């Protein structure tokens, strides 16, 4: 690839020295550092003469490298960049003149180290195949069992399940009382379905090519990539996903049999939403319906299901209480889809950020957050959910940095990463405060003969 | 005291980055920045499989050179520059943990490596690594850093096993 003139023009501003590398008469590479100046008009680089045994051959093609790094003691490095040029070198009166013809370069200000690494995955796979062929045994990358399980299942995202289930249980405890054993079974069943969904999502992202197309995965987006990296096979994660579904569905059926078959239809709807989130023929997330799927599955369905297991009936209160956490978990998906949108678009996954402009997406986020907290106020003041849940408003400021980052760093996946973390905290904090609202009401009701209205 | 001249060893011990030049199948030199580690006999570099073209080149042609030239990688007051030619071998017998044998040398030079190693789950392929072992053959030293003046040249005595 020929170097662009602007890349050559900026060499002096970006680098302090050049290294001339060539192959010597014995066949060994040799490299020598020297000073340089750029002749912008001619597109050449003037290099200070090199003396003695280290003198490069005249008239031959050499490699001239410019590299820069700033060590940050105790932290690592930053400002990493290099430009590697190839071309002929010739003697001039004052020294050496180099005419660049080919280039390879990287600058972490233009491409993050994570993306640079991600673009190396195909080379890593080729190398593993080569080492496997050389050694006659399959060489695969590894992670310890614990880390691999955490990565493959995306275990930290379980908060999305725990919040609505605990909220449903809290509402049931307020209205009907509750059983620890049933609460535990509900949590395990819900978590199994959620983990089954996470892993199934990776199965379909692998087969659709979405994982391979995504060179900007973050801690919160881009899937687990365990198959893409060769840490597990497609068959292994398919079996893992199926195992989670078997456990989740098994617990669900036990709860239906012991608590009431009305639960079956709710559980079936949840399981179908979970499977058809990415699975054909519906592929809901591909149609821009992922947020609605997640809202229903991780909001009303989980909270109502958890409530039913305890109370053996459906009520309006757990449904209303679950709407704010449902919206917020849908917003977690919504924001996490922003950095994935080039890869999603390439794989035909027409998520909302793929379909709409930045302006629409940012306004949509603000409107949904405003709606969430407005609903909490209305429901609590009306007494449709217990009034102490109004403390959930304290979580609202967490949405501000997310909103700002969506405006300023929409096209910078790694700059957006802290905001994605904050958005998850917004869901978690709001959910925990809603649950705490019910705990406050329960305590007030337990210790006071006639608790004031604002505590119930 | 190792097999290389004292000034060369001083640079190897302190430099945070070096430039490794290998020869590709077309005979073209290709240069990569890497952290040099030294135990008095061999120079060690580690390379992630993500950036493993250089490893393929070394397996096809083990002749390499390593330069320490970047002033930012040196300690204040170090102005000398050095290039070492040698023969390299790639150890990829255990990509997952084999490279950890040079971790004590790496840690001494870059203590932050333990922090990054703790994040292994985030970049699993980055920590699947080969070790490049360079047996030095000849060293060129520019004591005052001026490469427009002839370097001192040292032929390295091979160490007998």
Image (spheres, coloured by chain):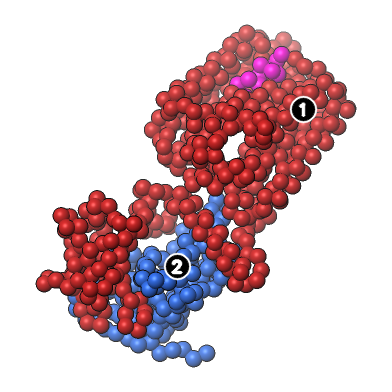
Chain colours: A red, B blue
Asked which secondary structure carries label 2, the reply is helix
Name the quadrant containing residue B63.
bottom left
x then y, percent, for residue B125: 55, 57
- Judge from the rendering whether residue A346 lies leftward or rightward of residue B36; answer left or right: right
Q: Are marks 2 and 1 in contact (CB under 8 Å)?
A: no
Q: Quadrant of the C terminus of chain A?
A: top right
Asked which secondary structure carries label 1, the reply is helix
Determine the residue positioned at 34% across, 64% down. Answer: B73
Q: Compared with residue A78, is residue B96 higher up or lower down, i.e. above or below?
A: below
Q: Please give the residue where the numbered disc 1 appears in the rendered image.
A: A268
Q: Compared with residue A197, is residue B146 higher up or lower down, i.e. above or below?
A: below
The chain to which mark 1 is attached is A
Determine the residue positioned at 74% across, 47% down. Answer: A239
Q: Which mark, residue B124?
A: none
Name the quadrant containing residue B127.
bottom right
Highlighted range, magenta? A316-326
x then y, percent, for residue A32: 28, 73
* Magenta region, main secondary structure: helix
Q: Please give the residue where the numbered disc 2 appears in the rendered image.
A: B54
Q: Quadrant of the N terminus of chain A?
A: bottom left
x then y, percent, for residue B3: 41, 85
Determine the residue positioned at 60% across, 42% down. Answer: A208
Query: Is residue A308 found inside the magenta-colored segment of the image?
Result: no
Assess disc 1: are there few (<14), some (14-19) or many (≥20) residues with their C-alpha within 10 Å of its C-alpha: some
Query: Is residue A321 found inside the magenta-colored segment of the image?
Result: yes
- Judge from the rendering whether residue B6 lies leftward or rightward of residue A377; answer left or right: left
């Amino acid at each position: 690839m020929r170097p662009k003139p602007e890349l050559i023009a900026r060499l002096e501003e970006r680098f302090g020295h050049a290294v001339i590398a060539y192959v010597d008469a014995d066949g060994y590479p040799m490299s020598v550092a020297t000073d340089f100046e750029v002749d912008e008009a001619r597109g050449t680089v003037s290099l200070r003469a090199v003396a003695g045994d280290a003198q490069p051959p005249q008239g031959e093609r050499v490699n001239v490298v410019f590299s820069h790094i700033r060590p940050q003691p105790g932290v690592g490095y930053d400002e990493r960049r290099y430009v590697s040029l190839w071309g002929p070198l010739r003697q001039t009166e004052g020294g050496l003149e180099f005419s660049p013809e080919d280039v390879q370069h990287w600058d972490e200000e233009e491409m993050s180290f994570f993306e640079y690494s991600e673009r190396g995955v195909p080379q890593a796979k080729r190398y593993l195949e080569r080492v496997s062929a050389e050694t006659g045994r399959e060489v695969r990358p590894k992670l310890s069992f614990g880390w691999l399980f955490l990565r493959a299942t995306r275990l930290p995202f379980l908060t999305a399940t725990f919040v609505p289930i605990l909220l449903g249980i809290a509402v049931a405890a307020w209205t009907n009382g509750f059983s620890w054993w049933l609460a535990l079974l509900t949590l395990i069943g819900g978590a199994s379905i959620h983990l089954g969904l996470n892993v199934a999502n990776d199965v379909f992202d692998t087969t659709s090519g979405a994982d391979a197309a995504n060179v900007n995965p973050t801690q919160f987006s881009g899937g687990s990539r365990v198959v893409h990296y060769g840490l597990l096979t497609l068959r292994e994660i398919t079996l893992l996903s199926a195992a989670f579904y078997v456990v989740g569905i098994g617990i669900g059926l036990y709860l239906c049999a012991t608590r009431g078959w009305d639960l079956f239809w709710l559980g079936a709807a949840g399981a179908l939403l979970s499977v058809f989130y990415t699975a054909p023929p519906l592929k809901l997330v591909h149609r821009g319906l992922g947020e609605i799927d997640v809202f229903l599955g991780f909001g009303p369905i989980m909270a109502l299901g958890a409530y039913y297991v305890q109370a053996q009936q459906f009520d309006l209160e757990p449904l209303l209480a679950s709407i704010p956490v449902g919206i917020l978990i849908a917003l977690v998906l919504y924001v996490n889809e922003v950095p994935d949108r080039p890869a999603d678009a390439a794989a035909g996954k027409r998520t909302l950020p793929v379909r709409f402009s930045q302006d629409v997406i940012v306004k949509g986020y603000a409107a949904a957050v405003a709606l969430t907290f407005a609903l909490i106020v209305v429901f609590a003041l009306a007494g449709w959910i217990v009034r102490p849940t109004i403390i959930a408003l304290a979580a609202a400021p967490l949405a501000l940095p997310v909103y700002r980052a969506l405006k300023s760093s929409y096209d910078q996946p790694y700059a957006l990463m802290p905001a994605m973390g904050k958005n998850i905290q917004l869901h978690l904090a709001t959910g925990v405060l809603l649950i705490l609202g019910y705990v406050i009401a329960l305590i007030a009701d337990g210790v006071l003969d006639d608790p004031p209205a604002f505590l119930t | 005291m190792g097999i290389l001249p004292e000034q060369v060893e001083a640079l190897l011990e302190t430099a945070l980055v070096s430039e490794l030049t290998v020869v590709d199948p077309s005979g073209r030199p290709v240069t990569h920045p890497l952290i040099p580690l030294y135990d008095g006999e061999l120079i060690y570099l580690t390379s992630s499989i993500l950036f493993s073209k250089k490893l393929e080149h070394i397996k096809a042609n083990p002749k390499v050179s390593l330069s320490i030239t970047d002033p930012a990688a040196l300690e204040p007051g170090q102005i000398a520059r050095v290039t070492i030619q040698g023969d390299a071998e790639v150890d990829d017998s255990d990509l997952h943990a084999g490279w950890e044998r040079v971790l004590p040398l790496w840690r001494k030079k870059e203590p932050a490596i333990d922090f990054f190693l703790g994040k292994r789950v985030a970049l699993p392929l980055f920590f699947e690594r080969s070790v490049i072992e360079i047996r030095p053959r000849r060293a060129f030293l520019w004591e005052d850093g001026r490469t427009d003046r002839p370097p001192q040249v040292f032929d390295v005595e091979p160490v007998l096993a």
